[in-house]
Image: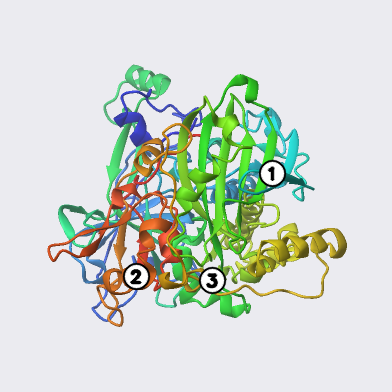
Amino acid sequence: MYRSALSAVTSKSRRPLRSPFFSPFRAETPIISSVSPSPGPESRLPIPSNRFSSFRDPPSRASFAPSICFPDWSPGLRRRVVSRTRGLCGGSGDRESLEYDVVIVGAGPAGLSAAIRLKQMCLERNADLSVCVLEKGPEVGAHIISGNVFEPRALDELIPQWRHEGAPIEVPVSSDMFWLLTENHSLQLPSPFDNKGNYVISLSQLVRWMAMKAEAVGVEIYPGFAASEILYDENHRVIGVATNDMGVAKDGSKRETFQRGRTRRKRKLFGHCPFCWFESILSFARYFNFYLAHYIYVEYVLGRVTLLAEGCRGSLSEKMIRAHKLREKVQGQHQTYALGIKEVWEIEEGKHKPGSVLHTVGWPLDMKTYGGSFLYHMSNRQIAIGLVIALNYRNPYLNPYDEFQKFKHHPAIKPLLMGGTVLEYGARTLNEGGFQSIPYSVVPGGAIIGCSAGFLDVPKIKGTHTAMKSGMLAGEAAFRTLVEGATMETYWDNLKRSWIWEDLKRARNYRPAFKYGLIPGLAFSALERYVFRGRLPLTLKHGKPDHEATDIASLHAPIQYPKPDGQISFDVPTSLYRAQETCHNRARILRHPQQPTKVPELVNRPLYAGPESRYCPARVYEYTPDENHGLKLHINAQNCLHCKACDIKDPRQNIKWTVPEGGGGPGYTIM
């Protein structure tokens, strides 16, 4: 299983990392130092180096003269340069950068598929391109959460022999049911999901396996590395990303422990040295392959092509979509979202049916709130159970976490869970805008892939296979751009010719139909699936953006939720403990001049009854007494699960979710 070097060194309960793909006999690559002058104060965009002011005509690697011979500490690395820039953007001190041919932000299905496909093409065409994948989680898979009934269509194209190569895809779907729930009963309906040939999996385990495959073909993967800013040159062309700073307080101020953004490299304890190491010691080191976690402080990661694969509501992706007006370029509508809350249980042997799949609609949600539940039987007596709620719900008193806890007490669900144990808990938002909300996904020097662009197939409730396919198309386009002289617009053209576009266009009207309510939505969906088959010459539009859909509190009555019993339902602190390693996120309140700094106290609480204390499934936001006997908003940033619900649902868009310090957040293993 893939692990970061940091976790291997710091955790006493784990053995040190030893990757079978880290060859001690790889040729060493020199690290080159260079000093670039600081740009003047008039420069608004960070330009890491004059050599890379424009990648339209990239410099030849042969033009670099090595200044010092030093071992290559990272696996599979070729042609990487570490450059040092001094005082960029008016700052002080030395700042380093890593330079690659392709930089991918996010080690999820899309990012890893792009990296693997690009390196596959390098092997096929005898080309040599360096590829780097940056992951904000402490290890690959730690921030990955999904249902997940997996459609292997894209994986069949990417790694055709995956069934014989140890992929954690072992439980085929054995039954597929769809229920309409009332408070005490369930009505079975025809299943519209067509899961024949699909598998029940853990997506976090799958991406760990994919990371090993990526390393095997020479991809560099840096976990614990949060990218916080897009870098442009003077022509406004994307040239890489900036890393997040360490030691920043919740209010954005610098603590005593403040340090510039950093990443880490796996380092061998002994390496090849032309001077004084005896061959016997070197052979010993090569045989046992020892490693240390070696930190370097790097503010910039530069790439001739940058791919953003951050997942739903990616921070950099949203910045890029707004800055370049990518939705306006294709007359796209706003994106709509849902919040998924999930637990993995271990149940009694007699109740376990591997491959059984169940979806429900209806209770506990009202007839105007779109959403539903899922229950999948995995391997090893484990089940995945969850509730998905569209974030355009109106009632500000609705609490998604408590709705999920209430759902588990339904008479058709509770008996299955009795006597079982919860193993993990997590939450994440997902895209539901579909075909209407896809932005133009290419910018000069880069592209947006996977769920960052919103390729989830809503009626299938699946986005992994589309994310992987989009990553593969982007990887192919990046290769042709760097080797054959094409442009990244090739990615967009091939995307529109792919089965992703065909599937999403055929499914475009399902989600918007439910803005009229559950029963009209089900009726229209049945007509669309069984009669029109996606060929209706009409495209429905989405309703209001999710944050505008929230009604003022005076229009609704408070919802009284039952207290958790500690056996089937649980309080938030208990669930957070099961999410593991949650820490160090920097969620903070925006302070725009046109917005009062007291928006939560002056607007959200009196008008909307403080919805941030309910829509967050980790209780990051809560109102506590202040010195004037009133209430003030308190942020428990350490609780954050990186679900992004606050960034989406806040009625006045007053909350800006920011990337964590590297390695922060949840630590999922089987989600």
Q: At which x and y percent is residue 670?
A: 51, 34
- Taking the spot 41% from the left edge, 67% from the top edge, the residue there is 650
Choose the circle earlier in sequence order: 1 or 2: 1
In this rendering, the label closer to the viewer, 3 or 1: 1
Name of the residue lying farthest toward the right:
531
Which element is circle 3 on? strand
Quarter location, residue 280: top left
How far apart are labels 3 and 1 at the CA level? 49 Å
Choose the circle earlier in sequence order: 2 or 3: 3
Choose the circle earlier in sequence order: 3 or 1: 1
Is 353 on the left-hand or right-hand side of 562? Answer: right
In-front residue for pair 258/241: 258
- Taking the spot 16% from the left edge, 55% from the top edge, the residue there is 255
Is 516 on the left-hand or right-hand side of 318? Answer: right
The amino acid at mark 1 is Ser
Which element is circle 1 on? strand
Q: At which x and y percent is residue 615?
A: 43, 58
The amino acid at mark 3 is Val
Q: Answer few, some or many: residues within 10 Å of disc 1's Cα (few below 14, many 20 plus, some between 14 and 19).
A: some
What residue does disc 3 label? 443
Q: Answer few, some or many: residues within 10 Å of disc 3's Cα (few below 14, many 20 plus, some between 14 and 19).
A: some
- Taking the spot 67% from the left edge, 61% from the top edge, the residue there is 518
In this rendering, the label closer to the viewer, 1 or 2: 1
How far apart are labels 1 and 2 at the CA level? 37 Å
Q: Answer few, some or many: residues within 10 Å of disc 2's Cα (few below 14, many 20 plus, some between 14 and 19).
A: many
In-front residue for pair 49/545: 545
What residue does disc 1 label? 186
The amino acid at mark 2 is Asn
The answer to whether residue 671 is visible is: no
What residue does disc 2 label? 604
